[in-house]
DNA sequence: ACAAAAACGATAAGCATTATCAATTTTGAG
DNA sequence: CTCAAAATTGATAATGCTTATCGTTTTTGT
C-alpha cells in the first residue's frame, strides 16, 4: 500500500471528528479544501483503512455505513430524535460470544450489536 | 388491510420454512406454484407483515434482509461456512437495554445483535 | 530519472429495495 | 347479487448506497 494524500486527509478527518461520519459526510467535509476529491476515493480508502485495521466500519445502524477511528471494542447507540451516534461500552454484554458458542456448539468469531432510542439531551427538550 | 391470496402464500411459506429466507428466496420458492407472482409483491407483503407484527425482519446478517415468523425475542447466528442461520436465545445478553440506558442516560427502545462463525456441523467436517 | 505499481477522478454498473401506475381483486353498501 | 370505492397486483422504473472500470496522475525504488 503506497502513501496517498487523500488517504491521509480521510484518516485525519475521521480522527478529528467524533461524529462517526458516513463516507458521504467525509466526502462533503473534505470537498471544501480539496474540490477535486472523488467520492469513489473516499469509499476506496475507507475500505483500505478498515482492512488494515486503522478504522472500524459501523454497519446496521442506518442504511449507510458509518466509520469510527476508535479501535477498541464498543457498541453504538443511535438517537432517533437528533440522529447523533453515541458510544456504548462493550461491558454491557459480557461474554456473549462464549455464551453463544456454548449454546450452539459453534465457534463464534464475530458479533455486532447496536442500540437506538432517545438520548439524554433530546429527552430534556419536549419536541425537536 | 384487505385479504390477499399472495400475502397468504408468503406468510405460509415463511411458517413452513425454518430457513429464515430472504425476499428473493421466498419469491423463487413461490414462483413454482404461482408463476405470475411479482418480486415487488413479495417485498410489499413482507413489509406489511412486519408492520402488523406477524413477521420479523432480520437485518445486519448479510447484505439482504432475512425474514422470520418466530416472534419471540431472539438473535441469529450466521455460519460463514454453510450459510445457514441459527437461532440464538435472547438470554445470552440479559438486561442490555437497561444497562445501556443506565450508561447513557438514554431511553433505549431497540437493540439488534447478530453473530457469525462456524456452526457445529461444519466444524466436524474438514472443508466444505 | 524513470519505469512499474498504486492510486486517482469521473462515471458506469451492481444490488437490494422501494415507488409508480394501469389493470385486477377484494370489499361492503344498497 | 351488483357495483363502485378501496386495496392489491404485476411489471418495471427509480432510488440509495457501494463497488467496478478505465484512462490519467502520483508514488516508489533502483
Image (tube, coloured by chain):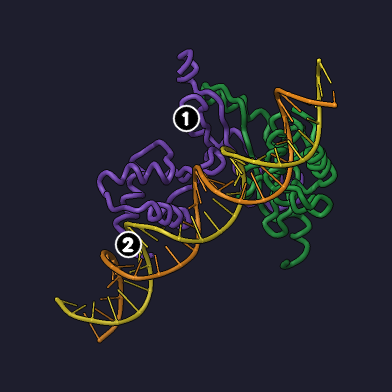
Chain colours: A green, B purple, C orange, D yellow
Which quarter of the figure has residue A15?
Answer: top right
C24 or C30: which is nearer to us? C24
Q: Left or right of A35: which side holds D15?
A: left
Q: Which residue is mark 2?
A: B3
Counting from the top left corner in percent of width and height, residue B75 is at 54, 37
Badges 2 and 1: C-beta atoms under 8 Å apart? no
Which quarter of the figure has residue D11?
Answer: bottom left
Q: Nearer the viewer, mark 2 or mark 1?
A: 1
Q: Which residue is mark 1?
A: B83
Which chain is home to disc 2? B
Counting from the top left corner in percent of width and height, residue B45 is at 40, 55
Q: Quadrant of the C terminus of chain A?
A: bottom right
**Residue B20, label in figure:** none
SS at mark 2 in the image: loop
- Mark 2 or 1, nearer chain start: 2
Q: Residue furthest top?
A: B126
Which quarter of the figure has residue A47?
Answer: top right
Q: Residue at x 45, y 14 (%)?
A: B125
Amino acid at each position: 500500500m503506497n502513501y496517498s494524500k487523500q488517504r491521509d486527509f480521510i484518516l485525519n478527518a475521521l480522527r478529528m471528528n467524533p461524529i462517526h461520519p458516513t463516507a458521504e459526510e467525509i466526502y462533503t467535509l473534505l470537498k471544501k479544501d480539496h474540490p477535486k476529491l472523488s467520492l469513489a476515493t473516499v469509499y476506496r480508502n475507507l475500505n483500505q483503512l478498515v482492512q488494515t485495521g486503522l478504522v472500524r466500519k459501523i454497519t446496521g445502524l442506518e442504511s449507510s455505513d458509518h466509520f469510527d477511528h476508535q479501535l477498541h471494542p464498543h457498541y453504538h447507540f443511535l438517537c432517533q430524535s437528533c440522529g447523533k451516534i453515541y458510544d456504548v461500552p462493550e461491558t454491557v454484554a459480557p461474554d456473549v460470544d462464549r455464551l453463544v458458542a456454548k449454546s450452539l456448539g459453534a465457534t463464534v468469531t464475530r458479533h455486532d450489536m447496536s442500540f437506538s432510542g432517545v438520548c439524554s439531551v433530546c429527552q430534556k427538550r419536549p419536541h425537536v
